[in-house]
Amino acid sequence: MTRGIINPAGLHDPTGYGYSHIVSAPGEQVFIAGQYGSDESGHVVSGDFAEQVARAFGNLRTALAAVGLGPSDVVRIGTYVVGHDERKLEVLLKELHATWGSALPAQTLIGVAALALPDMLFEVDAVAVRALTS
């Protein structure tokens, strides 16, 4: 069995909001810590929200690749947005669809007052599943 995405009848279509209601997959769970718009030394790359989101997802892909996985192995993400609003949601949706197309992971978006560093505007964590081998 591979990753399965389910958006059941009786619940709204969540894909326009950048997530799926249910994602299932057999295998080993891999937990990726929150990734933000940082360079290799941990410094925030820009004060621009869109640039931070793009870099955070790039960092997520780097973390996944380090364990032999990719975005298609992700079943759930948590996104954290400082001062969340419609404009920021549009930026996030663009990156989500660029990364996963219509096969979106389950997601919880949380608007927050601040993150770990004063310049951070966005953070994403993930749960991926390494497929079982026979």
Image: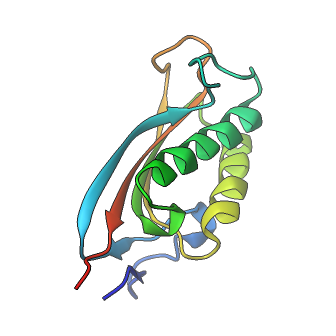
- Picture residue at 31% right of the left edge, 48% below the top: 31
Q: Quadrant of the N terminus?
A: bottom left
Q: Is residue 89 left or right of residue 42?
A: right
Q: Does 103 sit above or below residue 98? A: below
Seen from the viewer's position, the closer of residues 100 and 89 is: 100
Q: Quadrant of the C terminus?
A: bottom left
Q: Residue furthest top?
A: 118
Where residue 35 appears, as percent x and y from the top left, is 50, 35
Indicate the position of residue 3 as horizontal and vertical percent values. Answer: 38, 79
Q: Residue at x 77, y 27 (%)?
A: 48
Picture coordinates of residue 102, whole percent (x, y): 61, 76
- 30 lies above or below 88: below
Please tell me in which quadrant of the rendered image residue 74 appears: bottom left
User: Depth check: 80 or 65 in front?
Assistant: 65
Q: Residue at x 55, y 46 (%)?
A: 62
Query: Residue 100: percent from the left, percent from the top?
Result: 60, 67
Determine the residue positioned at 39% across, 59% down.
76
